[in-house]
Image: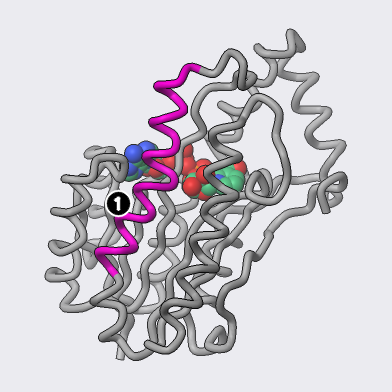
Amino acid sequence: MSQKVLVTAGAGGIGREIVRAFAASGAGVAVSDIDVAALAALRAELPGIVTFVCDVGRRAEVERMVPAAVAALGGLDVLISNAGIGGPTATVEDFPPEDWDRVLQVNLTGTFDVSRLAIPHLKRSGAASIVIMSSAAGRFGYPSRSAYCASKWALVGLAKTLSIELGEFGVRANAILPGAVDGERLQRVYAGRAEASGQSLEAVLVAAMAGQSLKRFVDPRDIAQLALFLASDAGKSISGQALCMDNDIQKA
Ligand SMILES: NC(=O)c1ccc[n+]([C@@H]2O[C@H](COP(=O)([O-])OP(=O)(O)OC[C@H]3O[C@@H](n4cnc5c(N)ncnc54)[C@H](O)[C@@H]3O)[C@@H](O)[C@H]2O)c1
């Protein structure tokens, strides 16, 4: 029987590759995102999916989206909690408190909300899987990225806790910790780093590549394949794990 999958923030970046991978596997896929145009473009590409406009950082929207997605799918086997924002690049001393709140709201509280609403449906699956998108920032400290870093560490704790609470119900939970992933977000991060340090963007990019053993960033399609594997029968003995996908030399 084909899996029923919900992917948050699935209209772009890593999430979109995850949607493509599950759709290609024959799964029924519900996608939520804040970007209406990107959702429409993805529907045009993958007519079998259903989409929902939802800001994961707004509890009322999440409380509408999850039941609607489950109803459209006719159940839920896989939750991919992918939504996450970076927030500004600033030291703790200078970090705007309202940006701290927003990053924590989207990355951590939003993931909590999606999880708690999905759990009753996942318990009914019999072979369910939660994948939470953390980050290499959920394993190491990152100067000037405190809110992002703290939220991504917290997500590892959430995934581990979910695995313990839900194992007896046949629900597994794992976190994926990607390193530097090819895409628009990384370009924004490096632009912010250049601005904060006073270096040129080119110098920042050269320094970033020097730290990569494979001399390239992580392909988002590889993260999608890891999510697919974790949710598959082949991953049935993996729960409570924080799995890195990275080739960072310093942080290996
Ligand atoms: N790109 C990387 O290098 C990298 C590395 C490690 C972890 N991650 C994590 O992977 C996840 C996806 O990252 P990405 O780089 O693909 O992101 P992205 O910035 O490319 O955005 C992906 C999607 O998220 C949507 N989105 C943004 N805010 C949202 C919100 N409040 N509610 C719902 N949707 C929202 C956007 O519209 C977009 O379609 C995030 O949790 C991120 O922290 C990314």
What stretch of residues is rendered in magenta? 96-118
Instruction: Give the image location of residue 219, x and y in percent.
Output: 63, 53
Most foreground residue, 120 or 80: 120
Q: Which residue is mark 1?
A: 42
Instruction: Give the image location of residue 160, x and y in percent.
Output: 55, 68
Above or below, 178 relative to 147: below
Q: Amino acid at mark 1?
A: Leu
Q: How many marks?
A: 1
Dot 1: element: helix
Say few, some or many: other residues with alpha carbon within 10 Å of mark 1 (under 14 / 14 to 19 / 20 or more). many
Magenta-drawn stretch contains 115: yes
Instruction: Give the image location of residue 141, x and y in percent.
Output: 72, 39
Q: Quadrant of residue 20?
A: bottom left
Q: Quadrant of the N terminus?
A: bottom left
Q: Quadrant of residue 31?
A: bottom left
Q: Residue at x 27, y 41 (%)?
A: 55
Q: Quadrant of residue 77?
A: bottom left
Most foreground residue, 170 or 1: 170
Q: Residue at x 13, y 62 (%)?
A: 68
Q: Residue at x 47, y 79 (%)?
A: 172
Above or below, 230 relative to 7: below
